Image: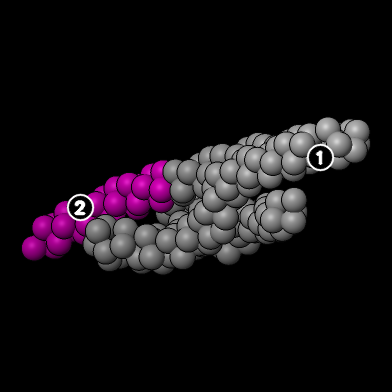
C-alpha cells in the first residue's frame, strides 16, 4: 500500500501541475484569428500586431511571428513559427509519461498486494487449524481486496487524466497550426497583390 500511496501523491501532483500548465499555454482564443485576418485584409497590419500584443497563448505567439516576419519567404517563416511553437508544445508533453506509467504500474502493484494478502491468508488458514483464529484470515483477505481496489482506482483516474491532457495537447497543436497556415495564406495573397501593383506601376512609368 505504501508504493500505491506514493504513486497516488505523484499522480495528484502531476495532474494539478498539468492543469496549471495547460491553462497558461492556451490554444485557441475565440475570434482572434478572424479579427487578425480582417485587419490584414484591410491593410491594417499595425492594428493586427497591436491586437496580438494584448493576447497570450501559443496561437497568438505564432501569429505574431507570422506578422513580424511576413516579408521573408513562406518556408522560412514556417520554420520560425515551428521553433516558437515547439518550445511551448514540449511543455505540454512534459510529465505526461508519469500518468501513463502510473496507469500501467498501479494495477500491477495492486495485484502484488493481492498476492501478498492471499499468501498471508493461506498462512493464517494453516495457523487457524490449531488456534481457531479467523481474524487473521479476514485481515489477509481485506489486505488483498484493498490493494486491488486502490491500484485500479489510481489507474482509472490517471488513465482519464492522461487521455484528457493528450486530447487537449492535440487540439492546441492543431488549432495553432491551422491558424498560422490561414494567416500565412492571407499574408501571401496580400504580398502577391502588392508585388503585382508594384510591377504595374513600374510598367506604367517605363
Q: Residue 73: horizontal and vertical position, in percent?
A: 24, 62
- Which comes before the other along the chain, label 2 or label 1? 1
Q: Identify the residue shown where x is 8% and y is 63%.
A: 206
Q: Residue 176: horizontal and vertical position, in percent?
A: 46, 49
How crowded is the residue under tag 1: few (<14 C-alpha within 10 Å), some, or many (20+)?
some
Distance of mark 2 from mark 1, alpha carbons? 95 Å
| In the displayed structure image, the side of residue 58 where residue 139 appears, left or right | right
Query: Mark 1 and mark 2 in contact (Cβ < 8 Å)?
Result: no
Q: Identify the residue shown where x is 83% and y is 33%.
A: 129
**Toward the viewer: 49 or 59?**
59
Q: Is residue 196 magenta?
A: yes
Residue 38 appears anywhere in the view: no
The residue wearing badge 2 is: 196
Q: Residue 139: horizontal and vertical position, in percent?
A: 85, 39
| In the displayed structure image, the side of residue 107 where residue 67 appears, left or right | left
Looking at the image, the residue that sits furthest to the left is 206
Q: Is residue 52 magenta?
A: no
Secondary structure state at the residue bearing disc 1 = helix
Mark whose residue sits in front, 2 or 1: 1
What is the span of residues highlighted in magenta in the rendered image?
A: 177-206
How crowded is the residue under tag 2: few (<14 C-alpha within 10 Å), some, or many (20+)?
few
- Is most of the magenta stretch helix, strand or loop? helix
**Toward the viewer: 72 or 103?**
103
Q: Which mark is residue 127?
A: 1
Residue 66 appears anywhere in the view: yes
Amino acid at each position: 500500500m505504501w508504493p500505491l500511496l506514493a504513486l497516488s501523491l505523484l499522480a495528484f501532483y502531476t495532474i494539478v501541475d498539468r492543469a496549471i500548465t495547460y491553462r497558461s499555454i492556451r490554444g485557441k482564443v475565440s475570434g482572434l484569428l478572424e479579427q487578425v485576418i480582417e485587419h490584414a485584409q484591410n491593410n491594417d497590419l499595425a492594428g493586427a500586431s497591436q491586437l496580438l500584443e494584448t493576447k497570450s497563448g501559443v496561437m497568438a505567439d505564432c501569429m505574431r511571428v507570422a506578422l513580424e516576419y511576413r516579408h521573408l519567404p513562406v518556408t522560412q517563416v514556417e520554420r520560425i513559427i515551428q521553433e516558437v511553437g515547439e518550445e511551448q508544445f514540449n511543455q505540454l508533453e512534459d510529465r505526461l509519461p508519469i500518468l501513463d506509467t502510473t496507469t500501467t504500474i498501479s494495477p500491477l502493484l495492486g495485484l502484488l498486494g493481492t498476492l501478498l494478502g492471499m499468501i498471508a491468508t493461506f498462512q493464517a488458514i494453516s495457523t487457524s487449524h490449531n488456534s481457531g483464529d479467523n481474524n487473521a484470515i479476514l485481515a489477509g483477505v481485506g489486505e488483498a481486496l484493498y490493494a486491488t481496489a486502490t491500484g485500479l482506482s489510481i489507474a482509472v483516474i490517471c488513465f482519464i487524466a492522461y487521455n484528457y491532457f493528450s486530447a487537449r495537447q492535440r487540439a492546441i497543436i492543431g488549432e495553432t497550426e491551422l491558424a498560422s497556415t490561414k494567416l500565412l495564406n492571407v499574408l501571401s495573397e496580400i504580398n502577391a497583390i502588392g508585388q503585382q501593383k508594384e510591377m504595374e506601376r513600374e510598367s506604367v512609368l517605363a
